[in-house]
Structure formats: C-alpha cells, structure tokens
Amino acid sequence: MKAAFEDVLKCAVDEIELSKEELIVLISAGGKECNALFQLADQVRRRYLGEEVHLRGIIEFSNFCRNNCLFCGLRRDNRSLPRYRMTQSEILEGVHKAAGLGCKTIVLQSGEDEYFRADLLAELVYRIKKEMDVAVTLSVGDRPREDYEIMRQAGADRYLLKHETCDPLLYARLKPGASLAGRVEELRWLGELGFRVGSGNMVGLPGQTVETLAGDIVLMRELKVDMAGIGPFIPNSQTPLGSCPGGTLEMTLKTLAVARLVLPLAHLPATTAVRTIDPQGRKLALKGGANVVMPNMTPRAYRTNYLLYPGKTGLTDTPEESFAAAVEAVTDAGCKVASGY
Ligand code: 5AD
C-alpha cells in the first residue's frame, strides 16, 4: 500500500472529515488497497447500521419519458422500445403483493411521464398509505415544486432523484435541456418539504474522471442525502452512447465503499446495474458498504420493457422470484433482512 493511501485510510478510520483530494486518493486505490478500502467500508456499515439489509420493492409503473438522456434506453427518441403504462389498479395490486412479501418500502419509479400528473400520483400514494403499512418512495423525475408539495402532502415519505454526475458540463451534454443546478435545486426543495432525499450517480460515464466521482460524493455529503444510488454506466445500443465503454465493477465498488466512509448513515443500495455487469456484483456491493437491495416488483409482463440498459437480470422472474433472489443475496453476503422501514 502506498503511504499516501494509508494516511488517508487512517484518517477515515479515525472519522476525520475527508477533503475531495483525499477522496480521490481512496477512489484511486489499486490491488491490495482495494481490499483494505472494502473492508473498512464493511466495518463502517456494520458499526453504524448493523447487519440488517433493507429490501425495497420497486415498481416500474411507466416507461414513457419526455426526456432524451443520451445514456438511457427510455429516452424519447428510442422508437424501438414498446411503451407501457400500468393502470392505477395494477399498481395498487403490485404494491399489495410487494407489501405481502415483506417489503417495508415501496419505490414507485417511472420515466418522466406527463400522464401521471401530481394529483394522480398523490391519489395513488394516499391509497397506498391508507391501505398498507409501508413507506413510499417516489422516483418520477423533475417536477415543479408544487408537484413535490402535493405528493408530500399525500403521504410520500421519500424521493429519489439522482444527480447522475456532479460535472455540470457533462450533465448538460447527457441530459439535453436540463441543468445540474436545476436538479440540485430540486433536491434542496425536496429536503425542505420534508422528504427523505435520495440521490446518486453513475460510474464510468464517458468523460468522467476520479475527480468527478469524488465530487459526486462531496455533493451528496453537502446535500445530506439519506440515500445514494451508485451504479455503473452500462452502454445501451439503442442510445447515442451505445458504443462507449461502460463502468467497471471495481470502480463501482470503490466509489460505493468511499461513499460509505463519507456517508456512514446513508442507505446505499447494491444496485441492479452492478448485478447486471457481474453475477457477483450485488453480493460484493453488500460486502463493501451497501445496505439496501431493491427487488423488482414490476409485473412480469411489463418489466421486459423497462430497459434502461441491456442485460438487466431477472426479466423473466415473477415478483415472488425477485424477492426470493434478493433475500438469498442478503443471506449470501452474511447479512440479515431488516425488519424496520
Ligand atoms: N446505465 C446505467 N444506469 C442507467 N440509468 C439510466 N440509464 C442507465 C444506463 N445506461 C440509471 C440512471 C437513472 C436510473 C433510473 O437508471 O442513474 O437515474
């Protein structure tokens, strides 16, 4: 191990707040340094959050999207993707199933689909909260502040809105018509409105450096996020970034581990994307700082078309099978399924 790396790791052990430069040293870990980093992240996770892993059932209720993000298969110019929108009763049925299986949190995610206006989502959230004892996370993209307010008043507990990358130029290039500043402002609104806020970023985006990744973590520390979804970028041939290289397992695990050191209490999922690039990805993430798994609770008929990136696993599984696989991953990693929210 290099002396500089050891020094920074020692500061992390002593829980001294790390600068962006120090985070870069950690994210640049190589060889044996990686193992030391993963072990420390695992220790920090166990010290602050124990061995409990939360299962959050995700229902991908619409793949219509008005946006044209260069990385995402749901982009509006992707005409080869059959579009679907679940009905309110299908969504409710899905939530009942997920809650019945034991999910304490339900994540409702979609493309930026204008059909699902705030009042419609509010009605859905209200009914879920009335009928079931679950926390509700919404992940439906950029909205005016009033919309967030309506959803919050209806009982939504959390909101997931990844900042994707902290590099404003890269953000603007990847998300035509949008700005990082706009998204960060929304993240602040969400916090002000009383949501538990989740953000996150992709690892391995074209044009990204280790400095960007350190900046992503610093931004999430500033925003005091409750949750950070960190997953590899996976090139999708149906998008303009189809021929770019994707994020690696190692870089994703290192970023996740450093995020754990900097955000000891945050919920960090072992993402579907990390499982997609490596069959061991989910387990390795759980052993290196992650404490959340998000089983896919989308009905089988629809999930094949929620294709953000290729190779997504579990596309032919039923919600029951996805749930069982998530429980197995938790046990395999030597952890326990959490009983709280
Ligand atoms: N590779 C990895 N993650 C992706 N997402 C979208 N497209 C891709 C891709 N090609 C992620 C983004 C988004 C979430 C819903 O999916 O981080 O926030």
Image: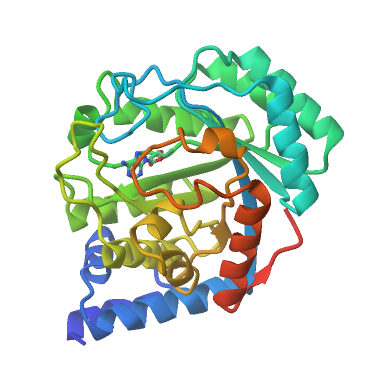
Between residue 314 and residue 239, name the one nearer to us.
314
Counting from the top left corner in percent of width and height, residue 112 is at 45, 22
Kindly indicate the quadrant of the structure image that contains residue 285.
Answer: bottom left
The quarter of the picture where the N terminus appears is: bottom left
Q: Is residue 13 visible?
A: no
Which residue corresponds to the image point at 20% horizontal and 55% vertical from the top-left? 211
Which residue corresponds to the image point at 37% horizontal and 28% vertical from the top-left? 74
Counting from the top left corner in percent of width and height, residue 132 is at 83, 39
Counting from the top left corner in percent of width and height, residue 294 is at 57, 52
Between residue 302 and residue 211, name the one nearer to us.
302
- In the picture, measured across the screen, residue 119 lies left or right of residue 183, that is right
Give the answer, above or below, for where 200 lies relative to 327.
Answer: above
Counting from the top left corner in percent of width and height, residue 260 is at 45, 65
- In the picture, measured across the screen, residue 96 lies left or right of residue 54, that is right
Q: Is residue 210 visible?
A: yes
Kindly indicate the quadrant of the structure image that contains residue 122.
Answer: top right
Which residue corresponds to the image point at 82% horizontal and 43% vertical from the top-left? 133
Count of picture labels: 0
Quadrant of ligand 1 in image: top left
Between residue 101 and residue 266, name the one nearer to us.
101
